[in-house]
Image (cartoon, rainbow, N blue to C red):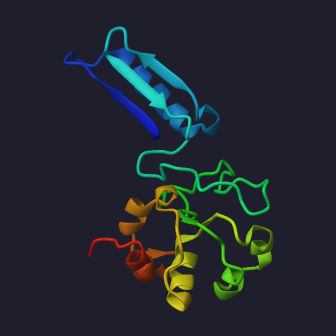
Amino acid sequence: MGLRCFHSTRETPTSAMFAAAAACFALFLSEAAASSIIRNDASGKVAMEIASSGAVSGAPSEQCGTAADGATLTGPSRNGFCANSDEDTHAVCASSLPANFCGDTGQSGWCTPFVGGPWCICMWAFAEYSEQHGCMDLNLAATDKEGICQKYSDNGKDLKKARECLRCPP
């Protein structure tokens, strides 16, 4: 689901509506408010919501999950969600992190405790690994496919193979 800020009225916007929009934007910036709901539905003029998922529009709609260590939540914020590709590179949910992922993508050995479980991986590393080994299994509902399909490079890496694996439109 995600953050939604909108007003539904045929009236001229009021200072209260602008204040509500500013409050919604402030909540968007605050991870602590990820489960807040603010509504003024009685008048039907202003409504805003931050879904309990913490995901934002265009970002993954489902959690990637808990890592293979059984304790660590995936995602750059460790909330179980991979990133919105416009905000962070960790936007791809690998269903099962391969044992050779770190070595084959030129990264340090951070992978070891997380091998075999879900993990939010970098767009560029997904492209790199996929070029070497073919497309890996992904949890697409936990991957920002739409956002990645709009990108052509990440961290200097061409995302052509990543876009191919995600079956992005040409």
Q: Nearer the viewer, residue 155 or 110?
A: 110
Tell me the quarter of the picture where residue 114 sits.
bottom right
Residue visible at 69% across and 66% down? 117
The quadrant of the rendering that contains the N terminus is top left
Q: Is residue 128 above or below residue 2?
A: below
Q: Does residue 25 appear to the left or right of 94 in the view shown?
A: left
- Residue 65 can be seen in this image: yes
Q: Position of residue 69 (x, y in %)?
A: 79, 61
Q: How many marks?
A: 0
Farthest residue to the top: give it: 42
Q: Position of residue 104 (x, y in %)?
A: 66, 87
Q: Does residue 32 appear to the left or right of 59 in the view shown?
A: right
Residue visible at 66% across and 72% down? 97
Q: Position of residue 143 (x, y in %)?
A: 49, 60
Q: Nearer the viewer, residue 26 or 160?
A: 160
Tell me the quarter of the picture where residue 18 sits.
top left
Q: Nearer the viewer, residue 17 or 47?
A: 47
Residue visible at 21% across and 15% down? 11
Q: Does residue 74 appear to the left or right of 19 in the view shown?
A: right
- Residue 155 can be seen in this image: no
